[in-house]
Image (tube, rainbow, N blue to C red):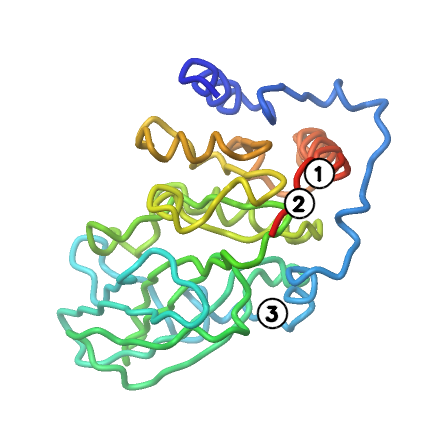
């Protein structure tokens, strides 16, 4: 895709349309189309993962937890690498101006019957001021994850990261805007646009699409090859002008690409833009139902 056409796609996405493979799809454009759902009813790893019991205990306000001072956070942390694969080491850099230790809990974000997250691990009395490490197990399905950091007096912040599965060529590859190159994010630790990424992820997983995840840096460094997937999905926060020329060239190798605009990704079911969601699902299903020209391995 040329530089000009990509800018056109992003402008249309910001205006509230769903733009996929350079084509704008509105509610009127799919009013008479028949849905194709064959690729959303299979027993793929994401469907199986979302059958697991969910937990909402990660949120600020749960139990006796509370947020942090946005200017002088009581607890902060960030992942040494924005994404990790099974078998690799997840490292968290932790700091605090008041606590010597904290509790680290790992959650995977998804749908989980509306609960939105699944608890995977808890480590207590983790020393602050040094790195905490854990090997990523094979049982962690690719997705957007949160390390929830809680001090003994209840202050809570987050360190997001992505688990990628480059060996599994899922139908869709979701590109997440996340970087840890500059240390922890301000406030609670969530980057700008993180809500867009997680909302889009939740919708895709609720719909049953076979998805895996990667960051923009993964594309730039060649850790993930978009050509192995049927389509690359770019939530509204991804694909902006900050992309390097190399990253853009890598994304252009994908057979198809889908841009989910912010209004689509952030809204909740039942709102007026349900038609936009329906348009996105219709187009994704048609992409997935089309014959694959070359086998993915």
Q: Residue at x 38, y 76 (%)?
A: 135
Above or below: residue 140 compared with residue 248: below
Q: Residues within 10 Å of mark 1 (few under 14, many from 20)?
A: few
Q: Residue at x 62, y 52 (%)?
A: 170
Q: Secondary structure at mark 1?
A: loop
Give coordinates of residue 229: x percent, y percent.
Answer: 59, 44
Give coordinates of residue 114: x percent, y percent.
Answer: 65, 59
Label 2 and label 1: CA atoms lie apart by 7 Å
134 with respect to 18 (left or right): left
Q: Nearer the viewer, residue 233 or 297?
A: 297
Q: Secondary structure at mark 3?
A: loop
According to the picture, the residue beneath numbered tag 3 turns out to be 54
Q: Secondary structure at mark 2?
A: loop
Q: Residues within 10 Å of mark 3 (few under 14, many from 20)?
A: many
Give coordinates of residue 288: x percent, y percent.
Answer: 72, 39
Q: Residues within 10 Å of mark 2 (few under 14, many from 20)?
A: few
Mark in front: 3 vs 1:
1
Q: Nearer the viewer, residue 112 or 64?
A: 112
Please report contact status of discs 3 and 1: CB closer than 8 Å, yes or no.
Answer: no
Mark in front: 3 vs 2:
2
Q: Earlier in the sequence, mark 3 or mark 1?
A: 3
Give coordinates of residue 283: x percent, y percent.
Answer: 71, 31
238 with respect to 258 (left or right): left
Please report contact status of discs 2 and 1: CB closer than 8 Å, yes or no.
Answer: yes
201 with respect to 194 (left or right): right
According to the picture, the residue beneath numbered tag 1 turns out to be 292
According to the picture, the residue beneath numbered tag 2 turns out to be 295
Above or below: residue 125 compared with residue 220: below
Label 3 and label 2: CA atoms lie apart by 35 Å
Q: Earlier in the sequence, mark 3 or mark 2?
A: 3
């Amino acid at each position: 895709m040329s530089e000009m056409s990509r800018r056109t796609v992003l402008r249309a996405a910001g205006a509230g349309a769903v733009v996929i493979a350079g084509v704008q799809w509105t509610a009127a454009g799919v009013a008479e189309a028949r849905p194709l759902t064959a690729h959303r009813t299979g027993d793929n790893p994401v469907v199986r993962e979302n059958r697991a019991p969910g937990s909402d205990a990660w949120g600020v306000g749960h139990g006796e937890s509370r947020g942090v001072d946005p200017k002088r956070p009581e607890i902060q942390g960030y992942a040494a690498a924005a994404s990790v694969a099974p078998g690799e080491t997840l490292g968290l850099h932790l700091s605090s101006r008041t606590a010597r230790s904290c509790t680290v809990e790992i959650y995977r974000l998804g749908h989980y019957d509306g609960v939105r997250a699944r608890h995977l691990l808890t480590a207590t009395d983790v020393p602050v001021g040094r790195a905490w490490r854990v090997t990523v197990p094979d049982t962690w399905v690719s997705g957007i994850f949160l390390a929830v950091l809680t001090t003994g007096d209840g202050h809570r912040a987050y360190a997001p990261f992505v688990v990628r599965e480059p060996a599994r060529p899922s139908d869709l590859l979701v590109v997440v805007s996340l970087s840890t190159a500059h240390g922890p994010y301000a406030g609670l630790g969530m980057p700008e646009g993180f809500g867009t990424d997680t909302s889009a992820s939740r919708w895709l997983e609720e719909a049953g699409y076979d998805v895996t995840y990667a960051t923009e840096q993964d594309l730039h460094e060649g850790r993930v090859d978009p050509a192995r997937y049927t389509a690359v999905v770019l939530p509204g926060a991804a694909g902006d002008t900050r992309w390097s020329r190399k990253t853009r060239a890598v994304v252009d190798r994908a057979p198809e690409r889908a841009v989910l605009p912010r209004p689509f990704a952030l809204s909740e079911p039942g709102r007026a833009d349900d038609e936009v969601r329906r348009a996105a699902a219709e187009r994704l299903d048609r992409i997935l139902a089309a014959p694959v020209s070359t086998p993915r391995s």
